Amino acid sequence: LELKQLIYLDNAATTRPIINVDGFYREYAQNSWYNPSAMYKQAVEVERKLNDARKTLALPISAIPEYTLFTSGGTESANAAILRGFHLNGGKKQHFIVSAYEHAAVYASFQALQNMGHSVSYLSPEQDGHISEESLCSLVNEDTALVSIMHVNNETGSVNDIERLSAAVKRINKNTLFHSDGVQGYLRCPFHFQASSADYYTVSAHKVHGLKGTGAVFFKKNTPLKSLIYGGSQERGLRAGTENTFGILFFGEAVKEYTKDLEQKLEHIKTLNLSLKQKLLRLDGAYLLSPSENCAPHILNIAFEGIRAEVLLHLLEQKDIAVSTGAACSSKKKREDRIHKHLGFGTNILEGALRFSFSFENTLDEVDTVSNEVAYALTNFRKYVRR
Ligand SMILES: Cc1ncc(COP(=O)(O)O)c(C=O)c1O
């Protein structure tokens, strides 16, 4: 009931589960709770369902189901691909490249590599929020083991051309592996993994209407990958521990449901985004932080000069509108401006940055309400401050 009243525009932080959990849970508790590694037919049936989920996840990005690994989420997927996914080269210290505005899941993995003695180049995006092919290529050398460039930036929505960037890296060093964090890009921006030169693409269920605590790594045949976790030989030895079968089956169902009329859903999301953008940019002191071109359909980042984003966020919260000041994982800590700083915005603007993120469930009426409430909050706040 509460959810109905709330205008939820924080879909880059997490999305509402798409299917009826009660019905799904009953089915699971009756038929699908067996251990998929066991040998009797009920268990084999669960294993078959897991493999069906693999097919469902891989299909929309033309990945190969056999090379789709289930994990506990986007964070573990990125950790696994980055820390357990490169050729060890006899223990020799190697070179890595990562864009400087990655999510902490990726960024901290590279800091771990650096702490192990490897060298890491951090590549800043261009002013428009994209990673330049030329700057990336200038960093690749014969010792570069792995490159990681995110598909869609979770704060601004800028989209990187992963097909082009991964191909460019391989032209310079065919042995350099390429990972892309696809958590915000998966099923929001078109991408064909198998046809691309990327070696790993990592995703998370709860960003596409699945449940938290489930994710996947898509990888290529013959690409190195080892288990991050020590233990049993589940997932063909690539991820120890009994599978989160409930989360995985739910992930499959969510993707099946979400990808029905996906193009229409994305068109709707784009329309909502454009409408809110146009309305908000008419307001005094509004400043677009999302790129004006090549932006993901679901993310809109706008700063309002002269007001701290937290203040505006709480004023909107009082009106039952949920938005974000940035990545949810860092918004509880002191605001981490690593990402925006790399985009070259001044602090007076950064302090007022709000992220609005949409799902297919939002409506144009909600957009109208939000733009009116932002205008109202700004006017009142500024009046109060000036007095
Ligand atoms: C770009 C990006 N990468 C990784 C993650 C981490 O995913 P998860 O929450 O499933 O660990 C997130 C979500 O917060 C994200 O937005």
Image: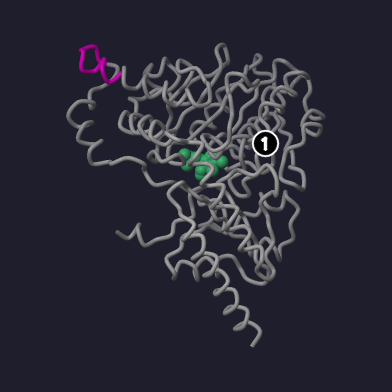
Please state which of residues 201 and 3 is positioned toward the viewer in this rendering. Answer: 3
Q: Is residue 57 magenta?
A: no
Task: Tell me the quarter of the picture where residue 17 sits.
Answer: top left
* Residue drawn at the location 63% of the way across and 64% of the way down: 352
Q: Does residue 50 appear left or right of residue 41 in this picture?
A: right
Query: Is ligand 1 less than 8 Å from the beta carbon at label 1?
Result: no
Q: Is residue 41 magenta?
A: yes
Q: Does residue 159 appear left or right of residue 187 in this picture?
A: right
Task: Tell me the quarter of the picture where residue 295 sits.
Answer: top right
The prevailing secondary structure element of the residues shown in magenta is helix
Please state which of residues 175 and 296 is positioned toward the viewer in this rendering. Answer: 296
The x and y percentages for residue 11 are 48, 49
Q: Name the quadrant of the N terminus.
A: bottom left
* Residue drawn at the location 48% of the way across and 26% of the way down: 228
The x and y percentages for residue 85 are 57, 22
Badge count: 1
Q: Which residue is mark 1?
A: 160
- Quick one: label 1, few (<14), some, or many (20+) residues within 10 Å? many
Please state which of residues 100 and 59 is positioned toward the viewer in this rendering. Answer: 59
Query: Magenta segment range?
Result: 38-47
Residue 106 position (above or below residue 167): below
Label 1, secondary structure: give it.
loop
